Image (cartoon, rainbow, N blue to C red):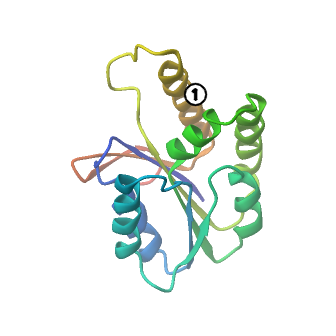
Amino acid sequence: MLELILGGARSGKSRLAEKLADESGLEVVYIATSQPLDGEMNARVAQHRARRPPHWALVEEPLALAHVLREQAAPGRCLLVDCLTLWLTNLLMQDDPARLAAERDALLGCVDELPGRILLVSNETGLGVVPLGELTRRYVDEAGWLHQALAERSQRVLFTVAGLPMVLKGEAL
């Protein structure tokens, strides 16, 4: 089952994904896409680590997400990816502009085939003001297109606001 969990910053989307993974009763593999390159991001990563049960496996992959998903997905296993917008940012910052398209296409090409339960967490960026810079506009566009494509493929799509989940598609929580 593929589930997309969207929300703004500090909306509760990661906590919701962690709760769903924990309640699944499945073996959980947490796939982290962040690159803690500064003190603030290190603090965020530490918060996430402190919340996770110690028996969850961890894979850190900032770029080759589809490869890791194919490698880790299995019946009886829940993969929790946090988060797609950090992954997208990592790809946008690469020197090779074709890398983003290749990795996005690889992700969209594999999610329908993955066994087990897949929880994808991402920041909804389309609710704010239109960014002024070219790179930030491209980021918002790429995130929006990615979310639409993944929502189409997902069996359930959730949107979180103030820690409260709303089901946009699929069965109720």
| Viewer-nearest residue: 36 or 153 | 36
Side of 131 relative to 108 (left or right): left
Residue reaching furthest front?
38
**What residue would you read off at disc 1?**
142
On the image, the x and y values in percent for residue 95 come to 71, 33
* Figure quadrant of residue 59: bottom right
* Figure quadrant of residue 30: bottom right
| Viewer-nearest residue: 48 or 38 | 38
Side of 68 relative to 136 (left or right): right
On the image, the x and y values in percent for residue 17 come to 42, 61
Which image quarter holds the C terminus?
bottom left
| Viewer-nearest residue: 50 or 162 | 50
| Viewer-nearest residue: 62 or 36 | 36
- Looking at the image, can residue 16 be seen? no
Residue at x 67% of width, y 49% of height: 63
- Relative to 26, residue 119 above or below: above
On the image, the x and y values in percent for residue 35 come to 53, 54
Residue at x 73% of width, y 52% of height: 66
Identify the amino acid type marked 1.
Glu
Residue at x 71% of width, y 42% of height: 108
Q: Residues within 10 Å of mark 1 (few under 14, many from 20)?
A: some
Disc 1, SS: helix
Side of 165 relative to 85 (left or right): left
